[in-house]
Image (cartoon, rainbow, N blue to C red):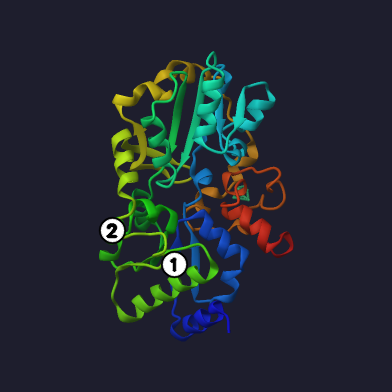
């Protein structure tokens, strides 16, 4: 019997009605790819929260990146980010209009462009959670060239979870393994104290099944704690050096999340000491000037259900655009762009006919 079958058998033995939310695009990918929702007992509902970094980046932050590109600055970002629609089109579409928008695999690639082309102003559009923020902090601490800066759109997991539990019915959380490698498990204890079982999980199907089993065991025993089911990567205290670099370079700020709105202290901004790398400050006037010209775009976007999908309140196949007007080749909303997006994964792994 496989490890997965053994875990499933144990899960079925103690199964009970439970709504478990994960907050990680990679977890969603594993769950969708292996059809885990179909093999778990029906009473176990696995919800997808706002854990896909490109999905949660709001329209107005993409608009700002486009505004900067329109003003003549070189915008660099990850491939997925270039396809996410803002209020009126994506960075990719800005590129097709002649803007200098370039795909990079890392911030180091973007810095290399700035070094190679010193006559150009190069901006790295930095997105993601606590997993990517330390790399960007480290890059700033290495003092990149003066023609390089970052347009920051980082999001923080814990403030989003605090907001979610006010609004949605959820019983337990699978904590995101990647984020836990940086911040550790202690920041999640506040949720356990409120009665939510929490288990940090890896990304293989057996690791996720183990996390679900551990959650059910906590519920059965009535003991709500944070457990680490991913000890090969996650230390309870996290990565202290990464935390220190983030603290040194960034400070928390209220931040907008796509579909969710503004969440207190859920984003990062560059500290004043490093403001010469802060594109939002350096190009503030240029951004504001160009933002005036951005019209409100695709009328179909008003039907997009990403807002509810990102809160685990809705399933992609309830969106009227799913697999029709909206598909991975022509995404209307952010959840259809990335391999970590809920709509992308439903399209890819559940099949259009089953949708
Ligand atoms: S299918 Fe497309 S339009 Fe519908 S919710 Fe998903 S991303 Fe938005």
- Which residue appears at 34% of the width and 59% of the height? 235
The one nearer the camera, 167 or 18, is: 18
**Crowding at label 1, few (<14), some or many (≥20) Cα neighbours within 10 Å?**
many
Residue furthest to the right in view is 353
Residue 64 can be seen in this image:
no
Instruction: Work out whether 15 lies above or below 181.
Output: below
In the displayed image of the protein, which residue is found farthest to the top?
Answer: 119
- Image quarter where the C terminus lies is bottom right
Which dot, 1 or 2, sits closer to the camera? Answer: 2
Q: Position of residue 68 (x, y in %)?
A: 52, 22
> Residue placed at 32% from the left, 39% from the top?
245
Helix or strand or loop: what does disc 1 sit on? Answer: strand
Q: Is residue 79 visible?
A: yes
Q: Residue at x 62, y 48 (%)?
A: 336
Residue 94 sits in quarter: top right
Up-down relation of residue 19 to residue 314 (above or below): below
Q: Residue at x 37, y 54 (%)?
A: 161
Instruction: Say whether residue 321 is left or right of residue 207.
Output: right
> Where is mark 1, residue-wise?
20
Task: Compare residues 61 and 105 and report the one nearer the observer.
Answer: 105
Number of callouts in the render? 2
Image quarter (top left, top right, bottom left or bottom right) of the N terminus? bottom right
Q: Is residue 57 left or right of residue 134?
A: right
Element on which disc 2 rests: helix
Closer to us: 291 or 207: 207
Q: Earlier in the sequence, mark 1 or mark 2?
A: 1
Give the residue at mark 2. 186
Q: CA distance from mark 1 to mark 2?
A: 20 Å
Q: Are marks 1 and 2 in contact (CB under 8 Å)?
A: no
Q: Position of residue 128 (x, y in %)?
A: 46, 43
29 or 310: nearer the eye?
29
């Amino acid at each position: 019997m496989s490890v997965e079958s053994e875990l499933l058998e144990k899960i079925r033995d103690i199964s009970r009605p439970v709504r478990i939310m994960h907050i990680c695009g990679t977890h969603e990918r594993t769950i969708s790819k292996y059809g885990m929702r179909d093999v778990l007992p029906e009473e176990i509902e696995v919800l997808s929260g706002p854990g896909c970094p490109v999905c949660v980046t709001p329209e107005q932050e993409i608009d700002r990146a486009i505004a900067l590109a329109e003003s003549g600055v070189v915008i660099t970002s990850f491939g997925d980010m270039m396809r996410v629609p803002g209020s009126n089109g994506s960075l990719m579409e800005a590129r097709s209009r002649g803007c200098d928008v370039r795909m990079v695999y890392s911030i180091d690639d973007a810095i290399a462009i700035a070094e190679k082309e010193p006559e150009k102003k190069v901006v790295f559009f930095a997105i993601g959670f606590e997993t990517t923020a330390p790399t960007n902090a480290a890059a700033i601490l290495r003092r990149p060239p003066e023609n390089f800066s970052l347009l920051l759109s980082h999001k923080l997991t814990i403030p989003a979870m605090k907001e979610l539990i006010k609004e949605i019915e959820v019983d337990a959380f699978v904590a995101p393994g990647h984020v836990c490698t940086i911040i550790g498990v202690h920041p999640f204890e506040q949720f356990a104290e409120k009665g939510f079982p929490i288990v940090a999980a890896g990304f293989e199907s057996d690791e996720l099944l183990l996390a679900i089993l551990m959650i059910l065991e906590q519920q059965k025993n009535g003991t709500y704690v944070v457990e680490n089911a991913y000890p090969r990567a996650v230390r309870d205290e996290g990565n202290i050096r990464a935390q220190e670099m983030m603290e040194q370079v960034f400070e928390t700020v209220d931040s907008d999340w796509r579909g969710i709105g503004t969440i207190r202290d859920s984003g990062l901004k560059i500290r004043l000491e490093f403001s010469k790398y802060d594109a939002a400050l350096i190009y503030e006037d240029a951004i504001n000037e160009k933002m005036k010209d951005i019209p409100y775009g695709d009328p179909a976007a008003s039907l997009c259900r990403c807002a509810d999908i990102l809160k685990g309140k809705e399933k992609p196949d309830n969106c009227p655009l799913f697999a029709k007007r909206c598909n991975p080749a022509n995404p209307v909303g952010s959840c259809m762009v990335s391999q970590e997006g809920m709509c992308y994964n439903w399209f890819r792994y559940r099949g259009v006919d089953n949708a």
